[in-house]
Every structure is written in C-alpha cells, then in structure tokens.
Amino acid sequence: IPSTVMAPKTILCIRHGESTFNAAWRVNPVDPLYFDAPLSELGRGQVSQARLTLGRYPVEIVLTSPLTRALQTAHGLFEGHPNVPRIQVAPLLRERVENSCDIGRAPAALAEEFPSIDLSQLNDAWWHKEGQPDARGICVEPIPVVQARAAQFKIDLVARTERVLALVGHGTFFYYLTGKVMANCEVTELVC
C-alpha cells in the first residue's frame, strides 16, 4: 500500500493590534466597558508594520475572529496581499469572554462595516452568553469551555485543505491554542 505524505501545513497565528480596551487597561486595569473595542491608533500602526512581514507568505485563506479589532486587523493585513486570500470569520476563533471588549455585535452590524469579509458562519449572538452575569452584565466564559473550543478549532484546522492559513485572533484564545503568550500584532508560525 503506497503511503501518502502530505506537505506540511503552515499556520500563521496573528494577535490583533492594540485595541482601545488594551490601551485603557494599560493605564488602569479596570474594565472600561468598551464593548467590541476597535483598534487604537497604536494598533493601526502595528497592523501597518506587520503587513510588510506577511506579504512574503503565500496565504490561501485568512480565518478571523468576529470581534471588530480582529476584523480590522485581518482587513488591514491582507487587503491587497499578493495572494488575494479570502477572509472568512471563524466563530471558534473568538476571544474568551471575560471583559466588555469580548462581547460582539450582530452579523448585520458587522457586515455594514466589513462588506468584503465572509460572515456567513456567524449566528446572531455568536459570543459566550451562558451562565450567571457578573456585576457588569457579562457572563464570563469558563476556562474549560475555552480549552474545548481551542481543541475543536485544532481539529478543524487539520481537516482544512489549504496549506498556508492565517489566523487573526486574540491573546487568551491563542494561549489555549498554542501555549504561547502573544503581544499585539505578533505573528507566530506553526507547522503541522
């Protein structure tokens, strides 16, 4: 029986650029109640710098979290990329809900702002909403739920046919996916 050897798959994990939530938290580590926080000015600059690095990769598809800061990062990094990869939302790639910035918006609102991104995988309320809300009204996502989501996402990645994928996501989720703590707009390359 002939064995089939598959070429290795390159997965680029890219944490979003700094958000307005990240900027406020750096000054005072209390939730500023910035729901679905967008990129800060510094974050937009980080995206511009990272864009140069990513142009050399033959990215076939970009999978992104549905949170605004990740969508802005994905669009900024890959608009005009030499391979013209399709950008598709992957709901499992969302951040762990633990603060206001991790609460998203409905697909219709996102579609108005990001018409070129495939949002077809999104339900109306795609973020974690189970459990008892805390004083801020936020249902914090239990760590075992995030770990299970990261494990399922790994299975889904292995099943994909693309050889070079870019993932635009978040620090906590990437920690559970890769075991690495990532800075804003840091790129971590995985080969599997």
Image: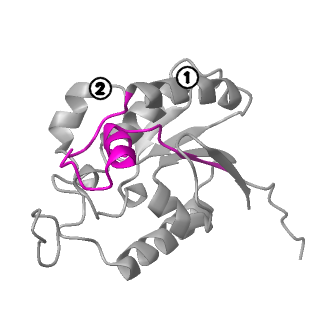
Q: Which of marks 1 and 2 is nearer the N terminus?
A: 1
For numbered disc 1, what is the local secondary structure?
A: helix
The coloring applied to the image is one colour
Of residue 192 and residue 70, the one placed in the foreground of this image is 70
Which residue is painted at 16% across and 35% down in the image? 109
Start and end of the magenta stretch? 11-40
Q: Identify the residue at horizontal 45%, vertical 31% (top origin).
A: 43
Residue type at mark 2: give it.
Pro
Residue 86 image position (x, y, % from top left): 49, 33
Q: Residue 7 carries which label?
A: none
Magenta-drawn stretch contains 38: yes
Based on the picture, tell me whether residue 20 belongs to the magenta stretch. Answer: yes
Q: Is residue 127 visible?
A: yes
Q: Mark 2 points at which residue?
A: 115
Real-space CA distance between mark 1 and mark 2, rounded to the nearest whole angstrom: 21 Å
Q: What residue type is labelled 1?
A: Ser
Q: Residue at the location (27% across, 50% down)? A: 101
* Outermost residue to the top: 80
Q: In which quarter of the image is residue 160?
A: bottom right
Q: Name the residue under label 1.
A: 48
> Could you say which is closer to the camera, residue 114 or residue 161?
114
